[in-house]
Image (cartoon, grey):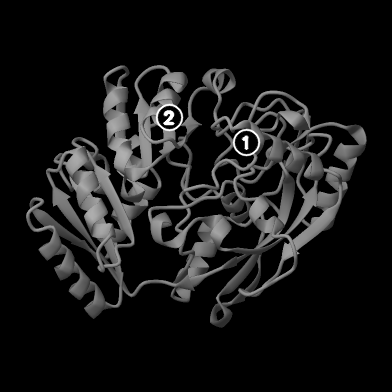
């Protein structure tokens, strides 16, 4: 087994060209924080990009940052914080959920997994903030797309095609993202004691108001004890985050209190406590328990999600909590992944998609980890794979079974909210 550890883009190109000439697959790897997501790989060789590291351009006034793909995301976020800026899409850290040390994710992996956090409703995901990339295709050819300015027109936006591809289309070497100023202050309102259906209604009311809520989530009973070191207690909590300038935040909070005054008791969580709470939500801390019990990430219409969860619980043991106004459901199963049952219920209750983000390798090999695509979209994904990686060099089989490019049916999964 050979592990290539390039330190320059040229070395990445050389390693990929060797793999293409030998027609041998490569596992594309950063620091391995998301290695356990997807079907198990059986690659003899690894392309480890962890040493391809460093910020190459940062212009705070222009709201632009470029870095090599193996740069730890935590290092970049620390640099941004020093300048009062942030990635507005709030990329999650899969490390705690997968039993790893936090902070190991890379900036290249952020785009490849199309990461987002609780602010997704307002700010979008990684694909909505990428400005440009440099990469090496599975043909052994270096290419670039986009640029280093916010307004850039350079033909087809191949940068966005990399979002949610999970390393199956190209090996990223450099990425450029848009950054934004961090909020001056933030406060979270926690409405206590609501059941899932009433919480869904309260979140919809808040998001439809003029209060400019940036995040809305619901922690059912028992889930609240698993965030903020248990300081919220065990009663359900429906969470609404408001960010911005101090006087504006105070005014909008009063709007929400008046709007939701009859919903239940309302608590305020401010400053660092609010930020820590949303980091726990972002990183799925309620299920970061050190186990390998199956965890699903389900995206579906917010109004229907709680009904799907109720129907699921009638047939299988599962815990759940909700983000994105209820449109993102995190599910932990107590036994088998129940993939067929879950996907059947998702179709019944409004449609959507489910990704198995944590499970033992045997289960990840046995069930579709990523949502199977309709025939037309699967054909498009296969053509995209054939253009970028005709010999199926990169991460073969990670998203779907099989070794040929025509079998790739999940290359674009994860791009929809």
Residue 398: x and y in percent read 65, 31
Residue 393 vertical placement versus 60 (above, below) = above
Q: In this image, 84 relative to 399: left or right?
A: left
Disc ID at residue 145: none
- Marks 1 and 2 close (CB-CB < 8 Å): no
Q: Residue 103 appears at what percent x and percent y?
A: 49, 51
- Identify the residue position indicated by label 1 in the image: 410
Figure label count: 2
Q: Horizontally, is 250 left or right of 113 in the view?
A: left
How far from the left and from the top, in percent, is residue 385? 75, 40
Depth check, front residue: 273 or 398 = 398
Residue holding disc 2? 347
Indicate the quadrant where residue 40 lies.
top right
For marks 1 and 2 on the same chain, the one whose residue lies earlier in the sequence: 2
17 and 412: which is toward the camera: 412
- Mark 1 surroundings: few (<14), some (14-19) or many (≥20) residues within 10 A: many
Q: Measuring 83% from the left and 37% from the top, which residue is drawn there?
A: 390
Residue 292 appears in the picture as rendered: no
Give percent across and percent down for residue 31: 61, 45
Q: Is residue 253 above or below residue 262?
A: below
Residue furthest toward the bottom?
A: 61
State the residue at coordinates (25%, 68%): 211
Q: Residue reaching furthest right?
A: 21
Which quadrant would residue 135 be assigned to in this image? bottom right
Label 2 sits on a secondary structure element that is helix
- Residue at 51% x, 57% y: name it: 74
Tell me the element at label 1: loop
For marks 1 and 2, give the CA distance: 18 Å
Q: Is 24 drawn above or below residue 337 in the view shown?
A: below
Relative side of 5 to 254, left or right:
right
User: In front here: 163 or 41?
Assistant: 163
């Amino acid at each position: 087994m050979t592990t290539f550890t390039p330190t320059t883009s040229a070395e990445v190109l050389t390693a990929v060209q060797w793999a293409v000439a030998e027609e041998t697959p490569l596992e594309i790897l950063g620091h391995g924080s998301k290695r356990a997501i997807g079907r198990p790989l059986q690659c003899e060789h690894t392309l480890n990009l962890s040493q391809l590291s460093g910020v190459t351009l940062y212009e705070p006034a222009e709201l632009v940052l470029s870095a090599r793909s193996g740069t730890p995301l935590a290092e970049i976020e620390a640099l941004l914080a020093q300048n009062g800026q942030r990635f507005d899409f709030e990329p999650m850290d899969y490390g705690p959920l997968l039993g790893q040390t936090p902070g190991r994710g890379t900036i290249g992996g952020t785009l490849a997994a199309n990461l987002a956090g609780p602010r997704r409703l307002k700010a979008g995901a990684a694909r909505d903030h990428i400005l440009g990339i440099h990469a090496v295709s599975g043909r052994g050819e270096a290419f670039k797309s986009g640029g280093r300015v916010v307004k850039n027109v350079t033909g087809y936006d191949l940068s966005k095609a990399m979002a949610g591809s999970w390393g199956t289309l190209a090996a990223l070497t450099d990425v450029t993202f848009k950054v934004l100023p961090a909020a001056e202050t933030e406060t979270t309102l926690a409405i206590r004691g609501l059941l899932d259906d009433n919480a869904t209604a309260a979140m919809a009311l808040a998001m439809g108001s003029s209060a400019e809520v940036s995040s809305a989530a619901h922690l059912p009973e028992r889930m609240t004890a698993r965030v903020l070191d248990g300081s919220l207690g065990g009663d359900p909590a429906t969470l609404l985050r408001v960010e911005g300038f101090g006087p504006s935040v105070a005014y909008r909070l009063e709007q929400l209190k008046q709007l939701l005054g009859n919903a239940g008791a309302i608590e305020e969580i401010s400053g660092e406590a609010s930020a820590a709470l949303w980091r726990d939500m972002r990183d799925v801390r309620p299920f970061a328990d050190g186990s390998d019990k199956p965890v699903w990430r389900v995206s579906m219409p917010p109004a229907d999600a709680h009904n799907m969860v109720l129907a699921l619980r009638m047939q299988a043991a599962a815990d759940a909590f909700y983000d994105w106004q209820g449109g993102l459901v995190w599910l932990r199963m107590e036994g088998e992944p129940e993939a067929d049952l879950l996907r059947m219920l998702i179709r019944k209750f409004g449609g959507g998609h489910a990704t198995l983000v944590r499970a033992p390798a045997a289960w990840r090999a046995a069930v579709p980890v990523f949502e199977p695509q309709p025939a037309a979209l699967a054909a498009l994904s296969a053509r995209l794979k054939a253009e970028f990686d005709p010999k199926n060099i990169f991460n073969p089989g990670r998203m779907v079974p099989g070794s040929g490019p025509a079998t790739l049916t999940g290359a674009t999964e994860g791009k929809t909210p």
